[in-house]
Image (spheres, helix red, strand yellow):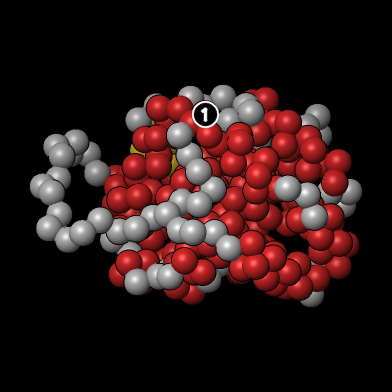
Amino acid sequence: MRRLLGLALAISAVVATPACAQDVWSWSVLVPSYAQTDILSTMLREDINRRDTTPAPPRAAAPVRLRYTPSPARRSANLARFVAKTRKVNPGGADDLERLFATDLFGQIGGLLRPYGLRTDDVADAYTVWWIAAWDASRGHGGADSDHDRATYQAVRAQAARALARVPSFAGADDAARQEFAELLLVQAVLAEAAVTQAKGDPQRLRAVAGAVNQGARAMGVDLTAMALTPGGFVAG
């Protein structure tokens, strides 16, 4: 998403410690257990590997609610928890995150997502942003190198929504759980963008960022090396 370049550059200025942005993989340990990322990743793999494009019959069950009502208080608590957990392994990175979270981060992200038909208060949208940003970063791309169009984002969003609808615990998740998961994904996405932006011109650092992002994605059950992004969404490859 080329529009995220400006945000990545701004984050790079705030995040003074390169290790903070490069440590995006460590955020995978903060994913709430309700998300059941092992089941979610299985659903995603099935979708990616599905060769039959015939539409599935309509489901009898009511659609899973993907949006939530964000709470500023919950957001502050979530971000404080992220910082506290990061401080245990990377004190300097935690300080950088505090500076980053003092900005209107989610307001900026929301404005950048709007032209693509995505929102910050929707778990499928957040997963889409993370998935594409992580895939780009795993290949050393991001910012100005990432120029996926609205149709591509919407195709990936449909894949994420189908997978989330099949995760048993997600149907019963409350707004607090949805917000925690979505905001974690969005923060990971912009940190991945910032890491790539910081590493531009340094092949060794770009490889380190790509390896770190791949490691983090695998911890969430997603093998970025086993898929390719097409205008119709992710496919095996």
Residue 125 visible in the current orientation = yes
Disc 1 on helix, strand or loop? helix
Which of 135/184 is in front? 184
Task: Name the spot of residue 102 as percent of width and height, x first.
Answer: 80, 55
Please give the name of the residue rendered at 48% of the width and 39% of the height, measured from the top-left corner. 118
Q: Mark 1 points at which residue?
A: 115
Label 1 amino acid? Pro
Quadrant position of the N terminus in the picture: top right
| Residue 95, quarter of picture | bottom right
- Position of 109 with respect to 11 (left or right) is left
Who's the residue at 87% across and 52% down the image? 17
Front position in the image: 230 or 181? 181
Residue 83 drawn at (x, y percent): 75, 67
From this view, report whether residue 222 is shown above or below residue 148.
Answer: below
Give the percent coordinates (x, y) of residue 221: 46, 60
Mark 1: give few (<14), some (14-19) or many (20+) Cα within 10 Å.
few
Let me know if residue 82 appears in the view. no
Can you tell which quarter of the image residue 134 is in? Answer: top right
Where's residue 220, x and y in %?
50, 61
Residue at the spot 55% in from the left edge and 36% down from the top edge: 113
